[in-house]
Amino acid sequence: MARSLRVAPEYIEKVKSAPQLNGYPSQQSLATDTGFSLSTVKSFLSGKPVDYLNFVELSKKLGLEWQDIAYKEPETQPPKPQPTNGEASPFITGAPINQPRYFFGREKELKRLFNLLKRHPLQNSAIIGKKRSGKTSLLHYLKNISTTPAEQLRPEQKSNWLPHPENYCWIFVDLQDARMQSREGLLKYILESLKVQIPTPCDLDHFMNVVSNNLHSPTVILLDEISVGLQRCPELDDRFWDCLRSLATNQTGGNLAFVLATPESPIDMAHNTGHSSPFFNIFGYTANLGALTEKEARELIASSPIAFTDEDVEWILTQSRCWPLLLQILCRERLFSLEEGENDDNWREEGLRQMKPFADLLDS
Ligand SMILES: Nc1ncnc2c1ncn2[C@@H]1O[C@H](COP(=O)(O)OP(=O)(O)OP(=O)(O)O)[C@@H](O)[C@H]1O
Ligand SMILES: [Mg+2]
């Protein structure tokens, strides 16, 4: 979730004049009235990042719609270039993998998922997996792999999953992001990603019209953390989901598909959160994320810049049972100990300790 927000450059003038228009003779008087520090108020007014909740509160005080004036990070920007100075971290633990070269395995799932997306009509799928199993990483990979330049991939990495990747529009929606939790915020974000004009008002009816008239190339909406949307966002109600279903099934000539990531099946999730929209019945294919195959896990381990002994590799495979996060943790510990020139086995103890919070991955 975005923890801080800033005013978009095109709104700074408007925001700067808002205190006067709302009866605050000075920035200090606004600070005093809201209870924020003067520096928070100054940062807000000048387009510097401030905490998300403070941003919402200050916007409200000044009669501004926070979703309108907030700068939106362009999610659809191409992946950042790889660092080439050897300083990139080879093992990533915790944050989702968003650079394809650090993503391993999931061959079977990728084959099935791309198969549903490469032909008309595009078809919907759901990625189901336990916490920390790699759902978000897989969504990022789907979005990025086909258009990442070969020099930013590992030499043997497959990227030709789609016949015309350049025609595709991928929209990554993280429903944990506060900006996606209001109906209008989410609709605007989707329209901006599609690069179509935002109607006024940006309500469901206008949204449906604009999308059905403008969606002429394959488009995939990746919905991450959808259970948060169902549990915490009253504006994302059954009518909203019904409209999305109608768009995908009837209104867009087979050009629109959804891929969801969720810890349980979409139907169960909807049921458990009191939703009855048939949107949750359109996911004809489900990818259940388990551990990597042994071959895939060995590839991840072999990406270490310092090779591990066969004995270490076997120990890592056994302890992690090929779960990607656990592989990453153990490989990181082994690499660190090798870089430090340590000759003992203390790294194993440390690795097991670091793995503990995620031990439920190992429950079958
Ligand atoms: N395909 C992969 N290749 C390499 N590492 C991976 C892969 N998938 C997941 N990981 C590892 O697992 C960690 C968790 O991945 P990710 O955040 O995608 O999981 P998640 O299922 O979305 O978790 P959450 O339930 O918390 O949202 C990553 O930080 C990375 O270490
Ligand atoms: Mg996730």
Image: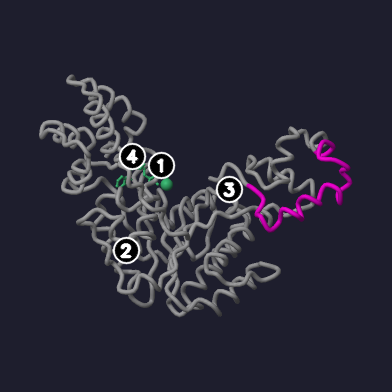
**Image-based side of 30 in relation to 186, left or right:** right
Q: Earlier in the sequence, mark 1 or mark 4?
A: 4
**Image-based side of 120 in relation to 157, left or right:** right
State how far apart marks 3 and 2 are (Cα).
Answer: 28 Å
User: Nearer the observer, disc 3 or disc 4?
Assistant: 4
Assess whether residue 22 is covered by the magenta stretch: yes
Circle 4: element type: loop
Q: Mark 3 = which residue?
A: 232
Q: Earlier in the sequence, mark 3 or mark 2?
A: 2
Mark 1 close to ligand 1, CB under 8 Å: yes
Circle 1: element type: loop
Compared to residue 321, the image places residue 173 above or below, namely below
Amino acid carrying mark 3 in the image: Arg
Assess whether residue 303 is covered by the magenta stretch: no
**Image-based side of 153 in relation to 11, left or right:** left
**Which mark, residue 87?**
4
Question: What's drawn in magenta, residue-wise?
Answer: 6-30
Q: Earlier in the sequence, mark 3 or mark 4?
A: 4
Residue 95 pos. (x, y %): 40, 42
Amino acid carrying mark 2 in the image: Leu
Residues at discs 3 and 1 in contact (Cβ within 8 Å): no
Outermost residue, left side: 310
Q: Mark 2 = which residue?
A: 113
Residues at discs 1 and 2 in contact (Cβ within 8 Å): no
